[in-house]
């Protein structure tokens, strides 16, 4: 507590009393508990509160930081927290506690749940809770930061897992919230545990020339301070000018070296000069009517003053030292998505070395270092107002409703919200925040679904570009549309945002559904016309609703048409339900009895329209139990069953009278084995056949036939095997795919020896 007291000394007496009471409450709750490091457990919540105090968080956040583990690890309840410290503190502590407790409950209900699933569920709850009260994630970031500082006490496996999670989720979250000092430290600590060799090597290399760099930057600082302090305009406009050196963080250096393929000596901004300006407050001016100017006008004037002193300081720097072309970035006019504002320029110092200079106001600096905490929104309440809520938090809420699976949700957050970002402009000058590698298609759907659906081209900075062009920071993007334009499936190959990809897929699903409905309607209408039945009368909505209810369990005729299109129902079945008299006219097909099955083979019986019947399997697609099938009435030979995606069955459904193609299902009581032919496709190499056969031996399988040949650089190994059903075959295929250089395993027809094109790939 001694480390915390100096940081809260300027707070009100009531606030200090609340924080002291929370400390005593937490100390008593954690009495006797020791951390892995050997320290009393209370040192952890105190360290979390210290981090929150350094960020300038409100008193409720500090109290929640002291109490954040009490409900999960001790007999203390949320009601106890609310009773002693208020509802806001209870809400924050509850958000922290729910994350892990809900994951533990899910684990208890499903013991087979993987660690990854548990972590994803944990993270999902945290991210959802964050949208209700952003202080929950800030307390969690402080908790994670102290845990990372003391990670050395954990086993190596946990070090790797926690560091990976920190690098992928928590550091990007800190960046998204604009809390720079937490982001940098989380990244460097994660780097230390994820790649210790690279970390220590880079640290040693930086240390060898550190004194030389410090002397170089010290000389530059002296010249910079003198130039700024001697400027008369700055003397009039600002109260304070802080000029200091800044070291680039290890992970940032390592990432830049890898991304740009540069050596350490080619990184110019290992050390940089940071200029922080504190403008003088403007005197309030009276409005024309004699009244004092409103607060909004005053605020805008102060913002203009802030920018003016920054740009003026930039002109001083450029007049003092020569700027390097192409090394200037204006984040004041175009802030980063997390609110970061600053001017960055790289100049040649008097010693001939490149030096990066960052110029910002005091307010901009606080936003850069402390993010959300710098312009705290919780002075009078615990929830973000709609106007204050950041756009990406809204997107987080949308993802929550769109994606139910926890793992998919976390992946979407990492990809869409926490990855690298680019900021581009609409033709009207509005900004759009998109993921790195976003294209004009992503931009179009981000503006409006209609613009995306009708896009036919794009102009970036006035030049025509392909729709697959990767947008860069600052691009001005204009989408060319046409009333007749429609999405292309090719767009899915380069659209990167989940929103754009979802809308493109939705368009094609709607289009395919419309085509399926039309096809199902045409099939039924054609069947009825062939039999000279009153089409208009029979296909009235009321009649079809009754038939749909009987055959599909739903009164929507669309379900009837979709079932006809998919082959789940035949037009004959629908017609006989519409006109019961047709059932008596139906020709009775009496399939010829098949001989008894050979030993070890299935008994040949399947259900055809609900009746257990003898049937033989088509050699073209060789169906096995587990495949979706239909029966075809072969004249004089009874039923032949095909896979529903067999090209021959697709043709028969289209060309033959509907009565000859009938729904079928496997007899669950059938026993024995089925013969299948597999084509193992792989890169040609010595020993590939032996490795595939070794898998069969391990799976206790004896092939009936093996044949191998090579076409160019591709090897094909044809296997004939006996399997029980589709599930058993899939497991065997997965085992074969595990062999090095095996590219795929395909089912082939027993007669043609060619791969079945539709649905044949084993997954």
Image: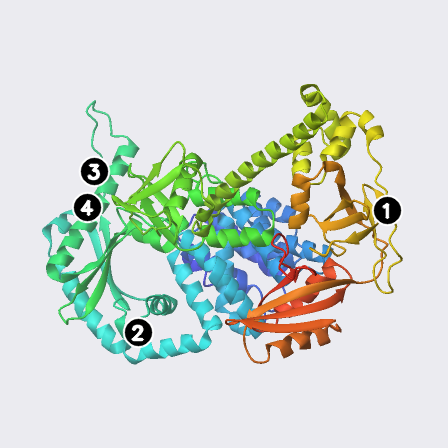
Quarter occupied by residue 53: bottom left
Q: Is residue 96 visible?
A: no
Which residue does the image show at 69% across and 61% down from the upper left? Answer: 730
Residue 643 in view: yes
Q: CA distance from mark 3 to mark 1?
A: 94 Å
Asked if marks 3 and 1 touch (Cβ < 8 Å), the reply is no
Circle 4 SS class: helix
Question: In 3D space, how far apart are the residues under numbered discs 4 and 3 (Cα atoms)?
Answer: 17 Å
Q: Nearer the viewer, mark 3 or mark 1?
A: 1
> Distance of mark 2 from mark 3, alpha carbons?
51 Å
Residue 308 tag number:
4
Frontmost residue, 667 versus 128: 667
Lateral position of residue 372 relative to residue 566, left or right: left
Q: Nearer the viewer, mark 2 or mark 1?
A: 1
SS of the residue at dot 2?
Answer: loop
Sequence order check, earlier mark of 4 and 2: 2
On the image, the x and y values in percent for residue 612 come to 86, 46
Q: Residue at x 74, y 31 (%)?
A: 574
Number of other residues with Cα within 10 Å of mark 2, as a class: few under 14, some 14 to 19, many 20 or more:
few
* Residue where numbered disc 1 is placed: 612
Q: Residue 291 location in percent, x, y?
A: 24, 25
Residue position for label 3: 283
Q: Which of the pair 592/617 is nearer the observer?
A: 592
Dot 4: within a 10 Å radius of its alpha carbon, few (fewer than 14), some, or many (20 or more) residues? some
Q: Of label 3 and label 1, which has the lower sequence position?
A: 3
Q: Residue furthest front?
A: 636
Residue bearing mark 2:
263
Find the distance from the CA under tag 4 to the CA under tag 1: 87 Å
User: Is 607 situated above or below 166?
Assistant: above
Q: Position of residue 266 (x, y in %)?
A: 26, 71
Instruction: Mark 2 or mark 3: name the one nearer the start of the chain.
Output: 2
Labels 4 & 2 near each other (Cβ < 8 A): no
């Amino acid at each position: 507590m001694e480390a915390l007291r100096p940081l809260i000394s300027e707070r009100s007496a009531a606030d200090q009393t609340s924080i002291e009471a929370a400390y005593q409450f937490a100390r008593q709750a954690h009495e006797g508990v020791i951390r892995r490091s050997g320290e009393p457990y209370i040192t952890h919540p105190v360290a979390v509160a210290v981090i929150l105090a350094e960020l300038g968080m409100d008193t409720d956040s500090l109290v929640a930081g002291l109490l954040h583990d009490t409900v999960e690890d001790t007999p203390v309840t949320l009601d106890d927290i609310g009773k002693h410290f208020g509802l806001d503190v209870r809400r924050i502590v509850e958000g922290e506690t729910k994350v892990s407790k809900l994951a533990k409950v899910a684990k208890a209900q499903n013991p087979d749940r993987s660690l990854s699933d548990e972590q994803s569920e944990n993270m999902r709850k945290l991210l959802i809770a964050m949208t209700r009260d952003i202080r929950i994630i800030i307390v969690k970031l402080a908790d994670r930061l102290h845990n990372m500082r003391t990670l050395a006490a954990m086993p190596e496996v946990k070090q790797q897992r926690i560091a990976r999670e920190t690098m992928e989720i928590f550091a990007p979250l800190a960046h998204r919230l604009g809390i720079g000092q937490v982001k940098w430290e989380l990244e460097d600590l994660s780097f230390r545990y994820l790649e210790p060799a690279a970390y220590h090597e880079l640290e040693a290399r930086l240390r060898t020339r550190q004194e030389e760099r410090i002397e170089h930057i010290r000389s530059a600082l002296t010249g910079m301070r003198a130039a700024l302090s001697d400027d008369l305009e700055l003397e009039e406009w600002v109260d304070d000018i802080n000029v200091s050196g800044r070291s680039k963080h290890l992970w940032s250096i390592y990432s830049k070296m890898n991304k740009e393929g540069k050596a350490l000596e080619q990184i110019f901004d290992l050390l940089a000069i940071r200029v922080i300006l504190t403008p003088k407050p403007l005197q309030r001016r009276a409005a024309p009517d004699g009244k004092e100017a409103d607060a909004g006008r005053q605020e805008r004037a102060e913002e203009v003053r802030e920018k003016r002193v920054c740009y003026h300081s930039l002109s001083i720097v450029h007049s003092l030292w020569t700027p390097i072309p192409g090394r200037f970035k204006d984040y004041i006019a175009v802030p980063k998505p997390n609110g970061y504002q600053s001017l960055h320029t790289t100049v040649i110092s008097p010693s001939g070395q490149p030096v990066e200079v960052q110029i910002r106001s005091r307010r901009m600096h606080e936003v850069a270092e402390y993010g959300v905490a710098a312009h705290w929104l919780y002075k009078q309440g615990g929830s973000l107002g709609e106007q204050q809520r950041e756009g990406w938090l809204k997107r987080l809420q949308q993802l929550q409703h769109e994606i139910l699976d926890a793992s998919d949700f976390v992946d979407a957050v990492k990809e869409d919200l926490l990855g690298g970002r680019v900021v581009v402009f609409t033709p009207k000058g509005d900004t759009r925040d998109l993921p790195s590698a976003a294209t004009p298609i992503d931009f179009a759907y981000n503006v409006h679904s209609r613009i995306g659906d009708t896009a036919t081209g794009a102009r970036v900075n006035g030049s025509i570009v392909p729709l697959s062009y990767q947008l860069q920071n600052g691009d001005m993007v204009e989408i060319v549309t046409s009333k007749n334009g429609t999405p292309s499936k090719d767009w899915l190959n380069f659209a990167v945002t989940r929103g754009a990809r979802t809308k493109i897929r939705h368009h094609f699903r709607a289009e395919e559904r419309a085509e399926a409905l039309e096809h199902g309607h045409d099939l039924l209408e054609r069947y009825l016309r062939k039999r000279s039945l009153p089409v208009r009368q029979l296909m009235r909505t009321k009649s079809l609703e009754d038939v749909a209810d009987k055959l599909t369990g739903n009164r929507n005729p669309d379900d009837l048409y979709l079932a006809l299109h998919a082959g789940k129902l035949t037009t004959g079945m629908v017609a006989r339900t519409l006109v019961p008299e047709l059932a008596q006219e139906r020709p009775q097909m009496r399939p010829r009895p098949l001989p008894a099955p050979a030993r070890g083979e299935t008994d040949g019986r399947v259900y055809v329209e609900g009746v257990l019947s003898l049937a033989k399997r088509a050699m073209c697609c060789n169906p096995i139990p587990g495949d979706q099938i239909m029966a075809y009435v072969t004249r004089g030979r009874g039923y032949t069953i095909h896979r529903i995606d067999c090209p021959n069955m697709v043709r028969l459904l289209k060309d033959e009278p509907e009565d000859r193609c009938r729904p079928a299902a496997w007899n669950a009581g059938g026993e024995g084995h089925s013969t299948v032919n597999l084509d193992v496709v792989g890169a040609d190499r010595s020993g590939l056949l032996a490795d595939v056969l070794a898998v069969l031996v391990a799976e206790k399988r004896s092939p009936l036939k093996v044949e191998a040949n090579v076409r160019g650089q591709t090897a094909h190994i044809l296997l004939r095997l006996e399997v029980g059903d589709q599930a058993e075959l899939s497991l065997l295929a997965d085992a074969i795919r595990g062999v090095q250089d095996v590219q795929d395993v395909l089912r082939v027809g027993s007669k043609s020896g060619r791969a079945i094109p539709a649905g044949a790939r084993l997954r």
